Image (cartoon, grey):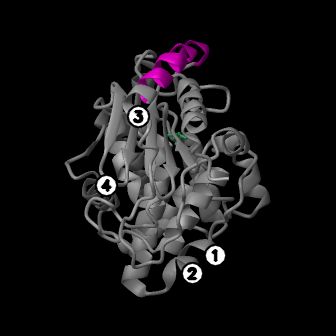
Amino acid sequence: MLAHPRRDDDAVSTSSAPPETEDLEAVLQEVADQVRSAAEDGTVADYIPVLADADPSSFALVLSCLDGREFAVGDADQPFPIQSISKVLSLVLAARKSEATDGSGVADALWGRLGREPSGDPFNSLVQLEHERGIPRNPMINAGALVVDDILLDHCDDVPGDTLQLVERLVGEPVSFDEEVRNAERGTSHRNRALANLMADFDNLNHTVDEVLESYVAACALSLSTRQLARAFRFLANDGCDPGTGERILSASFARRCAAIMLTCGTYDAAGEFAYSVGLPCKSGVAGGIVALVPGWATIAVWSPPLDRTGNSVAGRLALDELAARLDLSIF
Ligand code: GLU
């Protein structure tokens, strides 16, 4: 069993003992071989042509340890749009900006305007938002991410540019937006526009619907490889500190809270099932990526485009299930 030691805000990476006895690359390969064919049971997202055209047989699995070791199998260097996984990065950026610029703190800036409860409704539902008077349940559903983007617009002249800058710092190399995805999202964001309009009507947006949507679609189009995705999230498995550079990205307390939100709200309406079967904070996206945190030790990223009925990657979910079981990674 891995230890998951608690650290205070000032501590830099001291990752807990990994299972040195295992040949981790071989374990990843076995897991990949075992789960890949399950992708045949899923369907790729088809609301925009660029996602509908994704190769359903693409697959990558990466384990990125806090001590710098990295294990990868499959198409680990092929970029894909991380879509809703970016909602975590936008939340992180909003936390950083609101603390840095006006000292009001994350709590004041965020939690008066959105909640921290799983929604139990589809990620793009209008019904709940109407009932709850324009206050989104959490930052991992579309309405919540739109509020986070609205907060970012208070602090950033260029939200997409600041997002890229943060991610480039985390992965240590240039990254970009997939312009085809960004344009297609712009052209199909009728429901997101409806969510934003509803929130504007309830006075929960300070910026125009167009400005907020523009930031939102850029984040959906952020294009990372599975390897970069695993690297980008390591600070969240390390109490907010980037283990590569020692730089503090977030306070330890807010990093743990981001992990809590991922665990409870990060995988659409399957968050309970993920907590039960995988036992790790995870965030998934509609292009078939999932990133998981193993606090104090590593991150795991997986990519396989075909999705199940809950909108999570079929093979990705199985890979996390299997890897967490084999390496005894559950946080519970
Ligand atoms: N671009 C998608 C939307 O806004 C995001 C979907 C997702 O990954 O959940 O509807």
Of helix, strand and loop, which one carries label 2?
Answer: helix
Mark 4 vs mark 2, foreground winner is: 4
Asked if residue 235 is positioned above or below residue 156 in the image, the reply reads: above
Please name which of the two marks, 1 or 4, marks the residue nearer to the observer: 4
Q: Which mark is residue 112?
A: 1
Residue type at mark 4 is Val
Spatial CA span between label 4 and label 3: 26 Å
Determine the CA span between mark 1 and mark 4.
27 Å
What span is colored magenta in the figure? 28-42
Task: Tell me if 257 is positioned left or right of 237 in this view.
Answer: right
Secondary structure found at label 3: helix
Provide the residue designation for mark 4.
167
Residue 149 seen: no
For image coordinates 53% across by 13% down, the residue present is: 37
Side of 129 relative to 331 (left or right): right
Viewer-side label of 3, 1: 3
Query: Does the magenta run of residues contain 211?
Result: no
Q: Position of residue 64 (x, y in %)?
A: 37, 45
Question: Which residue in the protein does label 2 denote?
Answer: 108
Whichever of labels 4 and 2 marks the residue nearer the N terminus, that label is: 2
**For the residues marked 2 and 1, what is the alpha-carbon distance in whole angstroms?**
6 Å
* Label 4, residues with CA under 10 Å away: few <14, some 14-19, many ≥20: many
For the residues labelled 3 and 1, the Cα–Cα distance comes to 44 Å
Q: Amino acid at mark 2?
A: Asp
Q: Nearer the viewer, mark 4 or mark 3?
A: 3
